[in-house]
Each structure stands twice: as C-alpha cells, then as structure tokens.
Image (cartoon, helix red, strand yellow):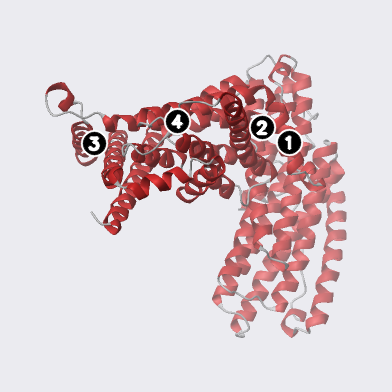
Amino acid sequence: MDIFSMILSLLSGVALFLFGMSLMGDGLKMVAGNKLEAFLYKMTNTSIKGVALGAGVTSVIQSSSATTVMVVGFVNSGMMKLKQAIGIIMGANIGTSITGWILCLSNIEGSSGIAKILSTATISAVVAIVGMLFRMMSKRTVYRNVGNIMLGFSILMFGMQTMSGAVAPLKESEAFTSMLTMFSNPVAGILLGIAFTAVLQSASASVGILQALSVTGSLTFATAYPIILGIGVGAACPVLLSAIGANKNGKRTAIIYLLNDLFGMLIWSVVFYGVHAVIHFTFLNMVMSPVMIATINTVFRVATVCVLFPFIPKLEKLAKALIKDSEEDLEDDANFDMLDERLLRYPALAIGQSNRVMYDMAQKVRKNVGRSLNLINEFTQDRFNKVQRKEDLIDKFETKLGEYLMMLTKRELNTMQTRQVSLCLHIISDLERVGDYASNVARVTNNIQEGNISLSEEAKAELNVVMDAVRETAEMTVQSVETMRDKEKAMRVKSLAAVVTALCEELKMRHVIRLSHGDCDLTQGTVFNELLNSFDRIVAHCTGVTSAAIKMDDMDADIHIHTSTISDAGKEEYRRLLAENAKKYRELFEEYQEKYNIENSKDRPLSMEPEPEKDRKSKK
C-alpha cells in the first residue's frame, strides 16, 4: 500500500468513526427524549452528584464536548448555576474515557470457535443487521432510534477497524518508528495531542486513533502519555466555540472545561516527569496496546477529578475573575434562590418572595422592550442576539415562578392568599407575553436587515412616535408591579394603551395612503404592520398586568381581569388621563407632520375616542 492510499484509508476510517459516534449519540439522546437534559439540571444539588451524572450522561452520548455544550446552554439560559456545572464537567471528562474501552472490542480476534463468534467483524455485522431491520421495518419512532444506535455502533467499530488496517503496514516502517520517537519529548507530545484533538474536535476520536496506532507495535509509553495529556486540552476547542455568543456565565462554563483539563495536564506532567527525573522509570519504552491506552486515559481523567474536586469553589472564583461581570450583567442576574421551597410552609412569606422575583421579571421585560425598540433605528447583530438571550431568561422566570406558585396552591391558603396567587399567575403570564412580542419586534427588524428592506423616513418617524408611547407604557407597568394596588398607575397604563391603539390604527391607514401613492411597496407595508401589531399587543398585555396588580387586596373586584370594567367613579379620571396622553402624542405627531410636510396626513387629524368600559384584549 502506497502512502497516498494509506492516508486515504486512514481518513475514511476517521470519517466513519466520527459519523458512527455521532449517529449512536444522537440515537441515544432521541430515545431518552428530554430526560438527559432534565437530569443535568435537576440532579445536581451536590457536586458529587454532578460528577456522577456527568460521567453517566457522557458514557451514554459518547462525547464530553456534547455534554459540556449542553451544560453551557443550561447555564446560559439560567437553568443551572455555574457551581452545578463544574461537577458535571468533571464527570464528563471521566465518562468520555468509556469510548476507549468500547474500542478495545476491536481487538477481539480469532479464527474459530468462540473467538470467531466474539470477533469485531461478527459483532459489528450482527448489530448492523439488527439495527437495519429496526430502522427499516419498525413503525415506532423509539425502535427506529434504537436501530440508529445499533447502526452507529457498527459504523464506529468498522471505522476503527479501517483505521487499524490503514496503519498496520507502518509496523514494518523504520521511518515511522523514528518519527514516533520524536514525540516522546513531553512538550512535543502534549502539543501534538492538543493540535490533533482541536482539529478532530473529539477526544474520543483522538484516543481511538492512538489505539489504532498502537497495533503497529511502535507506540511506547513515553510517546503515548504526553499525547494523552494533550488530548484533554484540545477537546476544549468545540466547547469554547459553542460559547461564542453566550452570556458571561456560559463563557465561564466553557472556560472551566478548559481549566479542568489544563490543570490536569500541568499537574500530572509535572508530577510524572518530576518523579521520573529522580527515580528514572524503566517502563517508558514499554510497547502500548489499545487496552493500555484506554487504561492510562481513564486513570489520568479520574485522578484529575480526584485532585481538583475539593477546589470546585476556587475554580468558580477563577472563572469569574477571568471573565468579569459588567454593571449591566449584575443588573440582569436572575436570583431564583429567593424562591425557597422551605418558605412554602409560610404562604405569606412565599407570596412576598414571589412578588420580589416578579418585580425583577418585570424590570427585565421592560429592558428587553427597550432593546427591541432600539433595533428599529440602530440594528446590530449583537444587540439582536442579546434580545433573544434575554427573552430566554424571561421565559425561565415564568417557568420558575409558575412552578413555585403552583406548589403554593397545594398548601392551605386563606381566600385572600388564593386570590393573590391566582393574580400573580396572571401577571407573570402577561409579562411573558410582553417579552414574546418584544422578541417578535426584534425578529422583524432582523428580517428587515436580511431582506434589505428600507422603510421611508415618514414611516420611521411615525414608528418613533408610537415607540415613545410604548416605552412609557412599559415603564409605568413596571412601577405598578413594584407598588401594587396603585389604581392611578393602572389608569395611566390603560390610557396610554388606548393612545397606542389609536396611533397604530391611524398609522396603518396612513401607510395605505403611501402605498396608493407608490411611496412604499407591499414588503415595506408588511413589516410596518407587523411592528404596529406587536406594539399594540405589548401595551394590551401591559394593561393586563396592571389590572391584576391593583386587585391584590380588593376582595370585591372581579378576579377575571380580562372581563373587568372601569367603575363609574373611575371613568372621569380615565378620560382626563386619556386626554392628557392623547394631547402629548398628538403634539409629537404634529411635529412630525410639519417636519415632513405630508399633505395627506394634515388632512387626517388624529382621533382617540375613550373606551373605558370595554376590555381591549377581548376585541383582539
């Protein structure tokens, strides 16, 4: 076999190996459904459980990088604390060594009897046939996924055999033997392990190739050991790439994965070669086998976890020191620890804590509304991504608060407490919907950028008038959640919402006029209307929030906030506030008319008739 054929065969084996590992891991995750993710963030209340869970999950999906990338996502979304993630990462480094032991099966050979039955070729063929039958003949999804697992295993084993067969002729090559001797230098070996794994983006694949090379009989302990030390560090490459665009806690999680392997490499290289300088180990020239490679890899990873485990708090501090929080990050931090299940025995305290977290949620919703509106005038991809990340956090607020409040309903509550819990559930639902529509505004602005859609200056100016009203509505809504029971703020929000609705309806008609004059096209009209619809829905749900907030202590009020009406005593105050806000935004609108000198707009005065007795949501 010439060198070109050998390299081609080796690369094809690597490709099959990686594809088989991916297919097997994906199949296992599909069979498990969302259980793997659930275990990752529910079963990590202690670090030792996190290590065990990380090792178990990684043993299943055959990739420490995949496990850690998953954990980066959980930390990034606020599902998991950074400290919880460290234990899982350590366990993932242990679990990934299981692949090396699976690959040792490829060395079971024989020509007759039991040895032939247990040979790799026989096992792979049987598993592949069964997997193919499951994949092609079963109608149930779970069995088809089991078939994918079996096919992935067979492809992985076949890829390993292909790699071993490709390098087998090298056992007779003196040039290859001398080249391997170069990497018996610790620094060169470590750098090779880092570079090789960074390219393959899989520690398991690197160990598998090392095991394949060991069948040549030319790989010694002195060469294999430093390469194994470097493999762990190189495996951090895909994890670091996955953290691009994540928040700071997500980036810290990726950094901890790198630090864990980096410290392990430094500790055991210093210890081993330091002791060797004194004692002079005699086994450095020992020829390695696949089983010995798997053993060294597992021992190294377990020993690293044992040494670093007591320093988990220090690793967390180091990661925070390397990636520091800005003031904005500290403001946007979600403190779900306030929802302590031990307080459920004291409903009044639990409701008080829920109100504090709910106010925190309202502030984050208000900030995200502002971010999304700013994208209309100043769009950047980073700002758009930030809106989407914060929306994920808002969704997490609804989940955490909702679960906590539902647990509270199972306790013995008096009539007032039952009412307050129900209204809190209304509020967080409406706040989450405000967040959804803010995210929709951001998505529309992204579509405008990607589609190179340009709104006219008149349309932008009109949107700015409405956006000012939406910002004010969101700000007043947050204040109503903070103070609760403040009917004046609720009236202000309702009147502002009516103004926004009138503005949106008027601007839609004005845009129709522009379309008829050929100043805008249908594509521009579509995104313009989408933005206005989102503005209208944002203020509608803000009204729902304040309507619930003012009823926290009012036993006589209707708890169904979306069918409530304004009392006769409140109608006069509502009309006054409506007139005040209408005048404010009519003046802004008139400034815009004078600036752009639009005759059609001047012929259409802005009309805002009050509808205090009707619910705005019921009209949608």
Label ID, residue 131: 3
The N terminus: image quadrant: bottom left
* 3 vs 4, front mark: 4
Mark 4 or mark 2: which comes first in sequence? Answer: 2
Residue type for callout 1: Leu
The number of callouts visible is 4
CB within 8 Å, label 2 to label 3: no
Residue drawn at point x = 74 percent, y = 77 percent: 604
Q: CA distance from mark 2 to mark 1?
A: 15 Å
Question: Where is mark 4, residue-wise?
Answer: 97
Residue type for callout 3: Gly
> Is 327 rendered above or below residue 98?
below
Residue 218: quadrant of the picture: top left
Mark 2 or mark 3: which comes first in sequence? Answer: 2
Residue 601 visible in the shown view: yes
Question: Where is mark 2, residue-wise?
Answer: 81
Image spot of residue 159 (x, y percent):
30, 43
Q: Is disc 3 placed on a helix, strand or loop?
A: helix
Q: Is disc 1 placed on a helix, strand or loop?
A: helix
Residue type for callout 2: Lys
Mark 3 or mark 4: which comes first in sequence? Answer: 4
